[in-house]
Amino acid sequence: MFSIQSKWRYLFMFLGIQLVVMALLSREGYQKRVTYFIRIFRKPDTVTLSGRNHTMPSNLGGDVYANLSLLPKAHNHGDDMPFCPKTSPLIGGPIHVSFPSGLTLAEVQRKNPLVVRGGRYRPPDCEARHRTAIIIPHRHREHHLKFLLYYLHPFLQRQQLHYGIYVIHQAGNYTFNRAKLMNVGFREAMKEEDWDCLFFHDVDLIPEDDRNTYICDSNPKHAAIAMDKFGYKLPYKMYFGGVSALTPLHYLKMNGFPNNYWGWGGEDDDIGVRVSLAGMYITRPSLKVGRYKMIKHKLDKGNDVNPKRFNMLAKTRQTWKLDGMNTAEYEIVSREYQPLYTNITVNIGTETGLHPPPPPTAAKAAVAVPAQDPKAKGPADPPTKLKEGQSQK
Ligand code: UD2
Ligand code: MN
């Protein structure tokens, strides 16, 4: 008798637990709950890779070079080339990203035989529908640049783009200025080719899904919506850092980027505010597709946090037309057509202007060649007398 009673008790308890589970399933959505229960029993996603830091994405991706072996080995350019299909057949979705030690630029070059001088590429077997320039602000991050080139070249080839990669290298040791380097990149890239889209790209962000197409939208696009460093979520609605894409028209409509954010922070928010002040809005890919891994790093020497950034941000409404592409003053130091990218080294001056009086002991600065392209428009030729920071006052 006793044992039958306890059997019933266990049966009721079991049914009770079932009921609770069913209630949970129907309340939060069946799929979400099932994933939750499965996750309890699964091993964590973290996998130690041969090379370096970082966790693997939960959706293990493929080799970024995999589909490219299908491409013809040489260009087939003639008048009769058909347009590339609207959606590239080479796109494969999630990409496996790791950072193996021992990678060299020579190896990246070997793996990208169709990339020509200056880091340019056109699909060998069809006429690209889009022309995209990648603008990378840079100083002392050669190690990151190598990995970015390793992933970006095949990524863009899989998208059948006509593209070029520009590395905008800040000369000297004065405080870094990411946004001003972007203004330089915009003007210098547009002098070379009629790009229809510009991707402004941190050197340390590696895209993890090639469905995140590097083409422009009808409004400025923020491509790096889901980064590992923010748990693959957008940190806040107006966030515009990392990787963004604008057409030349978008760029000029918002007067480019600010020139006066020296040091870390603030400039990305200023750019986001400019988008809306210029009557546009931010578009984004889905969280699933706009995924990026950031190569881990510390704050660089020469890029201290900008203590003025909050004050400056509060004034963007008053300053955006006075400071930007229309006041970007700089001097090109050199332009080198490397096998995998075009390197533009530029003197962007300091907070006190392009040619501040040299300190008494300073050595003579490197010979600077001013930008003198007849196609160049805007205040750089002839240079305006407006100094950096004046527009803030
Ligand atoms: C965040 C944003 C970045 C920018 C920055 C604030 C992400 C992923 N990115 O980056 O877009 O808004 O905050 O300024 O959240 N760089 C050099 N050499 C230097 C310093 C910077 O090459 O000495 C370049 C490089 O391309 C780098 C970028 O500037 O990726 C941004 O600097 P960061 O990586 O130090 O800043 P981070 O990761 O906090
Ligand atoms: Mn970074």
Image: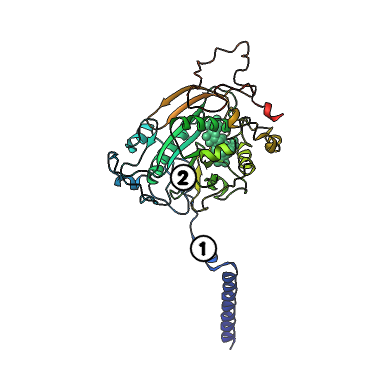
**What is the quadrant of the N terminus in the image?**
bottom right
Q: Is residue 157 left or right of residue 142?
A: left
Quadrant field for ligand 2: top right
What is the C-alpha distance between the residues marked 1 and 2?
Answer: 34 Å
Residues marked 1 and 2 touching at CB (< 8 Å): no
Residue receiving disc 1 = 35
Q: Residue furthest top?
A: 360
Mark 2: which amino acid?
Ile
Mark nearer the viewer, 1 or 2 = 2
Rendering quarter of residue 64: top left
**Closer to us: 57 or 202:** 202
| Residue 206: mark in rendering | none
Residue pictured at 63% horizontal, 38% vertical: 270
* Image quarter of residue 277: top right
User: Could you tell me residue 348's position as x and y percent?
Assistant: 56, 24
Three-letter code for the amino acid on which mark 1 is drawn: Thr
* Residue placed under numbered mark 2 in the picture: 215
If the image is split into quadrants, where does the C terminus sit?
top right
* Marked residue nearer the N-terminal end (1 or 2): 1
Q: Residues within 10 Å of mark 2 (few under 14, many from 20)?
A: many
The residue sitting at 55% across, 40% down in the picture is: 250
Q: Position of residue 322 (x, y in %)?
A: 65, 31
Picture quadrant of residue 320? top right
